[in-house]
Image (cartoon, rainbow, N blue to C red):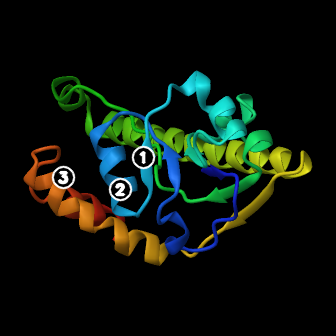
Amino acid sequence: MTFSNKAISSAADFDGLKMRVPEIKTYLELWETLGARPTRLAWGEVFLGLKTGVVEAAEGPVSAAYAAKFHEAAPFVVRTDHILTATHILVGEAFYQSLSPELQQVVTDAAKQATQWAREQAQKETEDMISKMAAEGAQVSEIELGPVREKAVAAVTRMEDAGAWSKGLWQSVQDLAD
């Protein structure tokens, strides 16, 4: 989610936006690529920073941002969905191979059901938080994400060249979604 003190209705609205982002190279690179002016500000100072204009926008996980009341300081809430949490279950290969084919199937099916449940719960939580923010006066909107993604892809080569990601990692992840 992105929280702003002015409406964001297109990818162009990020141009020049003074935005609080965590001091993580990939975050900084992403928001710079989108045209924002990343500003470092501790999480605990974001509400006051938004309220006073030290920053014009911030991003963050919906539940943490709701708890911090970002939507009260920056009432324009935009679903940018720029970070998705992956839920997965890991089982050691040696253990898995020691199971009978029937038990391997039970473990695989249970893992699929559990991760599907976790995704559904995360989506429900997001929708609940969005509803609460809207009920408390936030103007919740969505923007066309295609142009945002197209702009963001420019950062991929730079991140791979800088060694932040291995070459081809981004494309491999994209291929998983296909």
Determine contact: label 1, label 2, CB under 8 Å. Answer: yes
Q: Which residue is denoted by mark 2 in the rendering?
A: 32
The residue depicted at 43 percent of the width and 34 percent of the height is: 40
Q: Residues within 10 Å of mark 2 (few under 14, many from 20)?
A: some
Depicted 32 relative to depicted 126: above or below: below
Q: Please provide percent x and percent y for residue 146.
A: 46, 77
User: 143 or 36, which is in the foreground?
Assistant: 36
Q: Earlier in the sequence, mark 3 or mark 1?
A: 1
Mark closest to the chain's N terminus, 3 or 2:
2
On screen, residue 68 versus residue 27, left or right, reads: right
Distance from Cα at disc 3 to Cα at disc 2:
12 Å
Cα gap from disc 1 to disc 2, whole angstroms: 7 Å
Identified by mark 1, the residue type is: Pro
**Residue depicted at 73% across the width and 56% down the height:** 76
- Residue 6's place in the image compared with 1, above or below, is below
The reply to whether residue 99 is visible in this rendering is: yes
Identify the residue under disc 1: 38
Q: Secondary structure at mark 2?
A: helix
**Left or right side of 68 for 169:** left
Amino acid carrying label 2: it is: Glu
- Mark 3: which amino acid? Met
Question: Which residue bears the numbered disc 3?
Answer: 159
